[in-house]
Image: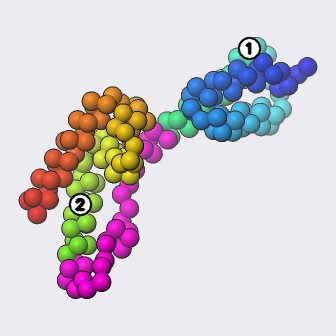
Amino acid sequence: MSGLEDSNLRAIGLSAANKILRCPHAAEDALQNTYLHILARGHFEHRAVFASYFYTTVVRPCLVRLRYERAKRRNCNVTDNLDKAINVSHGMTPEEILLQKEQINRILSAVRDLPPGQRSTMLQHILNGDRKITDLAASSGITKEAFKCRLHHGRRKISEVMGAA
């Protein structure tokens, strides 16, 4: 039996990918990409046993993907599509619509000016407000108290900007 067909090796690789990515579909994708990577190389250098080579080939791309997803969450951008954000009701004058656009623009500007941690916490809370703070904090990789603190300071800074405007 070849190294790629060993079911124990597959289970180890899948388990490692699952622990890192915490998503069975992403873990399976990582494992399939590992198989393709090893087959594309066409040869194996016998400096180490195949199992450790396989494990390393599974773990490295998973860590890269995890870092990428965390960076993407930290640097998420606020959409600038103001037309969707505005609640235009019948009977609103063009001046009222313009004032509402300006207010939304000030809020978006205030959110953009927040430090990255506070910005991501604020956006995560806004976009996923129906979830518990404990769950949001866990998905951010911080404690519940830290999440609440960031949320409090972010709200305070935005209200200061809005009050000054």
Q: Is residue 70 above or below residue 126?
A: above
Residue at 40 percent across and 35 percent down: it is 135
Residue 134: x and y in percent read 36, 33
**Judging from the image, what secondary structure is the residue with disc 2 in?**
helix
Residue 101: mark: none
Q: Nearer the viewer, residue 153 or 41?
A: 153
Q: Secondary structure at mark 1?
A: loop
Is 24 rendered above or below residue 74? above
Q: Earlier in the sequence, mark 1 or mark 2?
A: 1
Q: Nearer the viewer, residue 126 or 28?
A: 126
| Residue type at the position of mark 1 | Ala
Q: Are marks 1 and 2 in contact (CB under 8 Å)?
A: no
Residue at which label 1 appears? 48
Q: Residue at x 66, y 39 (%)?
A: 25
Report the Cα–Cα distance between label 1 and label 2: 56 Å
Considering only vertical position in the picture, is 164 above or below 15? Answer: below
Q: Quadrant of the C terminus?
A: bottom left
Judge whether residue 64 is colored magenta: no
- Where does the magenta region start and end? 69-98
Q: Residue at x 16, y 48 (%)?
A: 157
Left/right of residue 95 with respect to residue 5 in the rendered view = left
User: 165 left or right of 123?
Assistant: left
- Quarter holding the N terminus? top right
Identify residue for label 2: 107
- Residue depth check, mark 1 versus mark 2: number of the one nearer the observer: 2
Task: Check disc 1: other Cα within 10 Å, few if <14, some if 14-19, many if 20+.
Answer: few
Name the kind of residue labelled 2 in the image.
Ile
